Image (cartoon, rainbow, N blue to C red):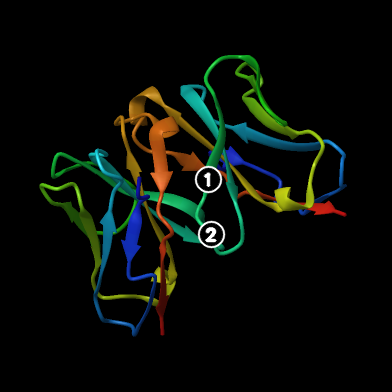
């Protein structure tokens, strides 16, 4: 079992729709959760992070964390074609807080 | 403020050779981490340097090594290159060690091993 799992996609949504990206993790000691956006040929860019159970909103992005279910998600409202990218989920924990463990990423396509 | 810079951006080597990649962190950032990204394995942690010392290491063979200089610049070295070492090597610097929300990635070095 991989430590951080994501559906590889592609997830295809029409422009203006809500895109929902999901991630599960295996280590119950995980403390911090991150979502990165990576455009093709570019490096990852941090777009959201969450530490506590519940929702965290930033503009069109909402991160949701459920530690009991070991599940973290990213919602993108009013999706735009420019949101088309690969979204990487990453976690770290108290034992190895200096290294991030990444999922394989979900490719998102927003259709105009 | 300048971002994380990595040189070279592209590199082609042959099996058995060695390679050195360079990373200059954002000014004021003292923690530097290296990651390898491949289509098959995704993004994997290589090692982290802070105050010129390797503090953490990922699950990679000893052919992968690195160092950090007093100005926080870092280099990583891969000896006896294998075809499977073809990857995007990413360097990331952090303002606060252990806080990934203060971490920024460089543009990466694309290494191709023939």
User: Could you tell me which residue is drawn at 50 percent across and 55 percent down?
Assistant: A43
| Image x and y of residue B97, in percent | 29, 31
Q: What secondary structure is found at the residue carrying circle 1?
A: strand
User: Could you tell me which residue is drawn at 66 percent across and 21 percent down?
Assistant: A69
Q: Are marks 2 and 1 on the same chain?
A: yes
Foreground: B93 or B37?
Answer: B93
**Mark 2 closeness class: few <14, some 14–19, many ≥20 residues within 10 Å:** few
In the figure, B23 relative to B102: above or below?
below
* Relative to B72, A112 lies left or right: right
Picture quadrant of residue B90: bottom left
Picture quadrant of residue B65: bottom left
Locate the C terminus of chain A by quadrant: bottom right
Q: Which residue is mark 1?
A: A45
* Relative to A71, A29 lies left or right: left
User: Could you tell me which residue is drawn at 52 percent across and 49 percent down?
Assistant: A44
**Chain holding disc 1:** A
| Image x and y of residue A67, in percent | 60, 18
In the figure, B103 relative to A59: above or below?
below
Locate the N terminus of chain A by quadrant: top right
User: Could you tell me which residue is drawn at 55 percent across and 62 percent down?
Assistant: B40
Asked if marks 2 and 1 touch (Cβ < 8 Å), the reply is: yes
| Image x and y of residue B91, in percent | 35, 53
In the figure, B9 relative to A50: above or below?
below
* Relative to A11, B27 lies left or right: left
Foreground: A23 or B60?
Answer: A23
Q: Which residue is mark 2?
A: A42
């Amino acid at each position: 079992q991989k430590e951080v799992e994501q559906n590889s996609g592609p997830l295809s949504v029409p422009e203006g729709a809500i895109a929902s990206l999901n991630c599960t993790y295996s280590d119950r000691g995980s403390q911090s959760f991150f979502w990165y956006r990576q455009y093709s040929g570019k490096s990852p860019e941090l777009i959201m992070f969450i530490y506590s159970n519940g929702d965290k909103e930033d503009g069109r992005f909402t991160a949701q964390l459920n530690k009991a279910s070991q599940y973290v998600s990213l919602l993108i409202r009013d999706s735009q074609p420019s949101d088309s990218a690969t979204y990487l989920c990453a976690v770290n924990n108290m034992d190895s807080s200096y290294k991030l463990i990444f999922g394989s990423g979900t490719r998102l396509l927003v259709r105009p | 403020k300048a971002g994380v810079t990595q040189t070279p951006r592209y590199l082609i080597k042959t099996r058995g050779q060695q390679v050195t990649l360079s990373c200059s962190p954002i000014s004021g950032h003292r923690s530097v981490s290296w990651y390898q990204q491949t289509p098959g394995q995704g993004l994997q942690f290589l090692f982290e340097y802070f105050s010129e010392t390797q503090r953490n290491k990922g699950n990679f063979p000893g052919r992968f090594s690195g160092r950090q200089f007093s100005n926080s610049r870092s280099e990583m070295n891969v000896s006896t290159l294998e075809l499977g070492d073809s990857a995007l090597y990413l360097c990331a610097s952090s303002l606060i060690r252990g806080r990934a929300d203060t971490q920024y990635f460089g543009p990466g070095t694309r290494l191709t091993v023939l």
